[in-house]
Amino acid sequence: MSAADRNLGRTRGTTPRVADLASTPETPRTPLGRSTSSIYGSPGGYRTEDEYIVLEIGARFVRGGLPGESTPRCTLSFGPDEQRRAADYRQWDPGHNRERTSRKRGQEWGQDHELYRLDLGRVDLGLVEDKFERAMREAFNKYFVLDTKPRRIMLSLPPKLPHPLMSTLLDVLFGSFQAPSVTLLSAPVLATVAAGLRSALVVDIGWAETLITAVCEYREVHEQRSIRATKLLSEHMAKLLNAALDDEPGVGDSKTDISFEEADEVLTRVGWCKSKPRSNRRTMYFVARTSPILEEFEDAVESPEPTITIPFPRHTPPTELTIPFASLAKPAESALFAPDTALNEFDDNELPLHHLIYRALLSLPMDVRRLCMSRIVITGGGSSLPGLKTRLLAELEALVSQKGWDPVRNYGSASARHEIIMNQKRENLELRNQEGEDKVSESLDPGAPLPPGLQNPEEDPIDAKLSHLALKNVPPTSLVGGVIRGVDTLGPWAGASLVAHHRIKGIVEIEREKYLQHGLQGATKEKEISVVQQRQSMGPGIGMGRGAGDRASWTLGVWA
């Protein structure tokens, strides 16, 4: 039937056939006003920012969610229970939870709970790929609940991640999940963004290492590492619990040590870090002042030391350990600060955390140090230990007051002269602060002119006006500098969510076609320190001859 016949049939009141309806479908259309209002309606409506998926990958976890959200939708860990084979129903066995798992021969502490290790000498990259793919499938099917449309991915990674490991992760995202593009962002920069700052000293207390990164205007300018992190802290906690169980009467007959899961649970629930101990001088002064008061109560009964009872149902036989609560702070003291060891006995990769932060600040230029020392961001899984942030800032402030910002550690034979000069400078500074410039000038020869260092500088009205205009629109928080101060952050994932929500492009943006064609070898060798920055057009022909000869090449940035 032709179109004219169909129109004629409608006019005469006849009903068209089913074949005619199938050939010319008429679907209901949503009014324009309703479609426009759905964009600004409930979260169930269409949202343009859902084109991105925000991921954060760590050594023991994968966090994922959608842009614009304050918290991730899922945090997936890696453990023996998440790596079960099909038809493995041991978790429903009533006695499975009572069995203590032991480490295999040649296996490192907590290796079953890791996604990857930076030492790739004994890492099976195929196993890493399978673990990551399984976690991503669980996140997509169980938590994201999105349609089949491919989504671009914004990926938060630690800086200096090895290329084979990065290539393994990208193979999963581009191959199994058909991501059109992947944007790589550095975790320290994202932690700075999530803290509402542009410059910061990010102290990331991770699983295998502690990474200290100085960020200035969203650019990584300095980096230092130490193996004193959560893994070493967990090992020290396991040694403490094993020693306490061996000393317990009637319990020390068991030949198996506590498992990683038990030590990690005790560390998470009751582990803590004590505050910085007072110096000898302040302690003697405090005792001297309070000795008359203490003499009145010398006959009073002291309160017993608080204790805590920790159950161990997997121990043979099941037991409960009663341990002093103060002893649970010893693992953090020995693993992260090591106060009983001289500083010259440490290697560069195992410095205590407060000395590592101090050396990182000492290595920065003066203007960058002024910004970073007042914006110390402590993040990572180990930073959630109660009392750790306060202890780190107190130890750092004590180091700065003791050593200052002098990069020379030993003056040799001139040490005595240097100490005399430093004492004179301190006395002159205290004299100027306490007595004022008038008394300083009176202490000098009345007939001699005032030294230039003690004279008031001439005020330039033009400079004063320009400085006033420059500070007019600057937020007050950006003016703080020169003091030790900590700033809280929401974490790298929240920073990546904020960056994706505001459509800020990254330096490292990898397209799927280019990666599948050339891999990581298609990137240029130019290193870009900045990670979050608005990309600008460089004009036609700039990228010719680079990488694979594409019109627009790409770079790996800080991962190059």
Image (spheres, grey):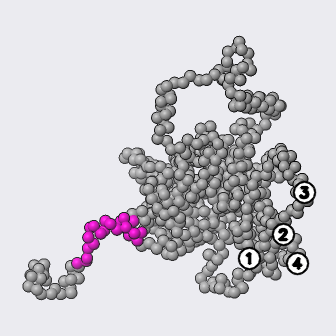
Asked whether residue 42 is drawn in magenta, I would say yes
Q: In x, y percent, where is residue 41?
A: 37, 67
For marks 1 and 4, give the one nearer the viewer: 4
Badge 1 vs badge 2, beta-carbon distance below 8 Å: no
Is residue 244 rendered to the left or right of residue 128?
Answer: right
As measured in the structure, the alpha-carbon distance from the residue carrying label 1 to the one carrying label 4 is 22 Å
Among numbered discs 1 and 3, the one appearing first in the sequence: 1
Among numbered discs 1 and 2, the one appearing first in the sequence: 1
The picture quadrant where one finds residue 57 is: bottom right
Amino acid marked by disc 3:
Glu
Q: Which mark is residue 101?
A: 1
Crowding at dot 2, Cα within 10 Å, few <14 / some 14-19 / many 20+, comes out as: some
Q: Which mark is residue 250?
A: 4
Taking depth in this image into account, of 365 and 445 the one nearest to the observer is 445
Among numbered discs 3 and 4, the one appearing first in the sequence: 4
Q: Secondary structure at mark 2?
A: helix
Residue displayed at 63% across by 44% down: 373
As measured in the structure, the alpha-carbon distance from the residue carrying label 1 to the one carrying label 3 is 51 Å
The residue segment tinted magenta is 26-47
From the image, tell me which residue sits under label 3: 298
Give the overall secondary structure of the magenta segment. loop
Amino acid marked by disc 2:
Ala
Among numbered discs 1 and 4, the one appearing first in the sequence: 1
